[in-house]
Amino acid sequence: MKELSRNIIGTTTGKETFEYAWRDIALYAAGVGAKDNETQYQYEVGLKALPTYGVVPYWGTFGITPHRDLPRNVTFSLNLDQEGSFHMAHKLILHQPIAPMGARLTIEDIITEVYDRNGKGAVVRSELTAYDESGAKVFTNVGDTIFGAYSVPSAPPYPKSTVVFPEREPDFTEKDFVAPNQHLLYRLSGDTNRLHVDLEEARQRGFDRPIMQGLCSFGFACRLAVRDLVPGQPERIKSIEAQMRNPLFPGTEIELSLWKAGDGRAYFRLMDLQNSRPVLEKGEIDWE
């Protein structure tokens, strides 16, 4: 395996601009499965933003200056070997509610840590934070990407999740259906990675057809969780995180299971019901 230096910590994209309008908020909601009875996420009168709209610039293209042709987080500036690489975990922290009618934000993506997975790859953690025009933080994305071609002998081990599911039935379950064209709709929010649309690209990556975007599944989980935990009040969500376990294909039924874990906290798992396997695992969501 190749060795990766921890000297990459501190690498940054520099300051960039991310702009969006109410239409982008509504389009994102449709991209993560909002139904015709969830007009609060799609109608500009009384519009509310789903908290996970905050993940959009992490793998974004549209609305970002300087322009990106394809989604690129800070790790792409390192020209690392992409063999065996994938986005393995994500956390979104909401410092304030996302303005539903639009905003002009300053964003910066910085590598904050590098972990070793006992010879099974290097995990690079980056944090993309968005600031409003007053300089206040709006949201922070903490994304972990594994690079299977590397090891980092001097790095700390990748931290284990602290989520432990209670030994009882979930407090809430929500079923939903990921439409056959869901990946095409979600990409209109900016994740234009060709893996999610191009058949030949998908086959080169070992899939028989394009797969769903991992952060689209993340958005589905958040939308469904809001129904049960803070109905009609998505602005109360303070953070959401999960591990990405298995690829999900368009045209699949899914189920979210939620376990309350104290005041203002719940754990969750998102299952692919067609293949009986987890899509998102060790999930945690916090609200006020």
Image (cartoon, rainbow, N blue to C red):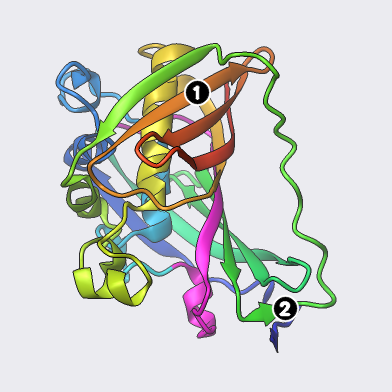
- Viewer-proximal residue among 58 and 223: 223
Residue marked by disc 2: 151
Residue sitting farthest toward the bottom: 2
The reply, left or right, for residue 210 in relation to residue 267 is left
The reply, left or right, for residue 93 in relation to residue 16 is right
Question: Does residue 90 show up magenta in the picture?
Answer: yes
Question: Does residue 222 show up magenta in the picture?
Answer: no
Q: Amino acid at mark 2?
A: Ser
Residue 230 in sight in this render: no
Residue 87, image x, y percentages? 50, 60
Residue under the image location 24 percent in, 28 percent down: 34
Q: Residues within 10 Å of mark 1 (few under 14, many from 20)?
A: many
Q: Amino acid at mark 1?
A: Ser
What residue range appears in magenta? 73-100
- Viewer-proximal residue among 274 and 217: 274
Residue marked by disc 1: 257
